[in-house]
Image (cartoon, rainbow, N blue to C red):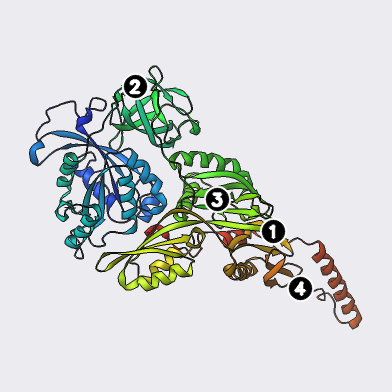
Amino acid sequence: MPPTNDPGVNRPGATVPDRIRNFCIIAHIDHGKSTLADRMLQLTEVVDARQMRAQYLDRMDIERERGITIKSQAVRMPWVVREGDLTGEQFVLNMIDTPGHVDFTYEVSRSLAACEGAVLLVDAAQGIEAQTLANLYLALENDMTIIPVLNKIDLPAAQPEKYAEELAHLIGCDPDDCLRVSGKTGAGVSHLLDEIVRQLPTPQPGNDGAARAMIFDSVYDVYRGVVTYVRVVDGRLGARDRIKMMSTGAVHELLEIGVISPEPIKSDGLGAGEVGYLITGVKDVRQSRVGDTVTINARPATEALGGYKDPKPMVYSGLYPIDGSDYPLLRDALDKLKLNDAALVYEPETSLALGFGFRCGFLGLLHLEIIQERLEREFNLDLISTAPNVVYRVITTDGTEVAVTNPSEFPDGKTGEIFEPTVRATVLTPNDFVGAVMELCQGRRGVLLGMDYLSADRVELRYTLPLGEIIYDFFDQLKSRTKGYASLDYEPSGEQASDLVKVDILLHGEPVDAFSSIVHKDKAYNYGVTIAGKLQKLIPRQQFEVPIQAAIGSRIIARETIRAIRKDVLAKCYGGDISRKRKLLEKQKEGKKRMKMVGRVEVPQEAFIAALSTSDAPAGDKSKK
């Protein structure tokens, strides 16, 4: 590579904004973002050949096991242009590899706010899918420069010409403007890096010169405390500066500042347009909030940066430690995980059946599954998660309004109107399966908003659906009815009044709050029968007969019975008159009647786990969305 004209261009803090390009890679899941990032790391030689491995930026075990990206990863790469009028000039590329699943859209939106441009990646064998559209619209909302790229051109099934036309039609460019690359073989990747330098705008620092940096991510290190990732917007942050968090007013001394390339590298400072990390040694996880503005305490900025829009949880579920003494550990674990996943929302709650725990808000079922798995692996906890549900707004007959995040909060007595959250769902499917998709959506109380043909054989369907109808097995059903070809994306779209009821599960006449659920009136009977049948198999037999009932208010809609164990009281009677035996049996009968009056049904922990666990719910593995 020819030497650069500016020897200090790749030194953090000394790089002028004109030499910096900040971009992220956005795409639908499994379209090759992480593989393309691997080739970029190899081409720019920031990772040694001996250390290189597939999906290098996917650091978590869960990511590598499932083959999906969960956390955005930022990396700084030097690049010497190889083609065109800038040949031989050196630049600094700050790349962020983002997740592709709909449940991690908040990660993507934060990454976009730290960049000037985006590489929109489309699989040349699968074409545009639902999350491709969602991520594209996110980027357009941020007024970003989009570079359309077709990946996997080395596949025998690739149709780059066909999908280049689709992509060009969507963005409003020429099909020849869509770059063709292969993340696996590396074909076209160096040309893509040259085009990133050529097409993307340079960072534009403000005029007043006061240092301002946006926190876009953070992580907790056991030894070093909170590590904060920032994008410097204005001015310069230097090592040993005293910095101030503008939202809390907290002042800290910088112990270390540097860049991720892709391992942490210490530097003297970070200039405008650069992306890096800060370490202050603070152990209090509440001191570093995603979206906060960092400035220098001696010369503070007068105005904070815009920050991020707070994510709105879509699904709520209770997380409870199996061992009640682990409750403080769970609270600390959630505090630390919140630092690394800003979309997590939680508050303490108690359950008569499960004890102390937390009501947690998630962006979807996969998000719930990943959070629970991370808590169990990273913090060594054993947890139960209750059945997921959404937030309902209930207006009682006396005009009181109640927000219900948990069925146990559902008001007793007469309810006037019940509102449930709805989503605007976008389904992309081959036109052979349009009928099957419409039948599925209408069966889930969906309302068709519109239908467009993206090409001769691909259709986009837009529906309004109740969120409660799609958080369980909707995606699984969609895949099975379309032979795996359809893709789904959804976003919140308000609420609607619905005919909903609360189904209580009674054990021996006593309601068990953990099994209660809010369902549509038409599906209440099925829910009651299913849970009652499940519990009959799971709860061990008692000395007395135990009825399991499903009820709406005071009306019983389903019943199963656990038969009593009969102790053999006649075992010690060898011969003798029948009246002796009858006397013992009558005595046993009286004892059982008395026990039934005062008896309390003990539900084993395994029954709660099996009946409430989301892992065996019909939703299946949603990681392939």
Q: Amino acid at mark 2?
A: Ala
Residue 282, given in percent of the width and then of the height, sits at 46, 28
Label 1 or label 3, whichever comes before in sequence order = 3
- Disc 4 from disc 1: Cα separation: 43 Å
Q: Which residue is mark 3?
A: 382
Image height of 571 relative to 64, above or below: below
Q: Amino acid at mark 3?
A: Asp
Within-10-Å neighbours for mark 4: few <14, some 14–19, many 20+: few
Q: Nearer the viewer, residue 541 or 261?
A: 261
Q: Amino acid at mark 1?
A: Lys
Q: Secondary structure at mark 3?
A: loop
Q: Residue furthest top?
A: 298
Label 4 or label 1, whichever comes before in sequence order = 1
Closer mark to the observer between disc 3 and disc 2: 2
Q: Residue at x 28, y 28 (%)?
A: 205
Relative to 342, is 389 on the left or the right? right
Q: Which residue is mark 2?
A: 210
Residue 267, given in percent of the width and then of the height, sits at 29, 26
Closer mark to the observer between disc 2 and disc 4: 2
Closer mark to the observer between disc 4 and disc 3: 3
Quadrant the C terminus occupies: bottom left
Q: Nearer the viewer, residue 608 or 438?
A: 438
Q: Secondary structure at mark 2?
A: loop
Label 4 or label 3, whichever comes before in sequence order = 3
Q: Amino acid at mark 4?
A: Arg
- Disc 2 from disc 4: Cα separation: 81 Å
- Disc 1 from disc 3: Cα separation: 39 Å
Residue 618, given in percent of the width and then of the height, sits at 49, 65
Q: Residue at x 83, y 69 (%)?
A: 593
Within-10-Å neighbours for mark 1: few <14, some 14–19, many 20+: few
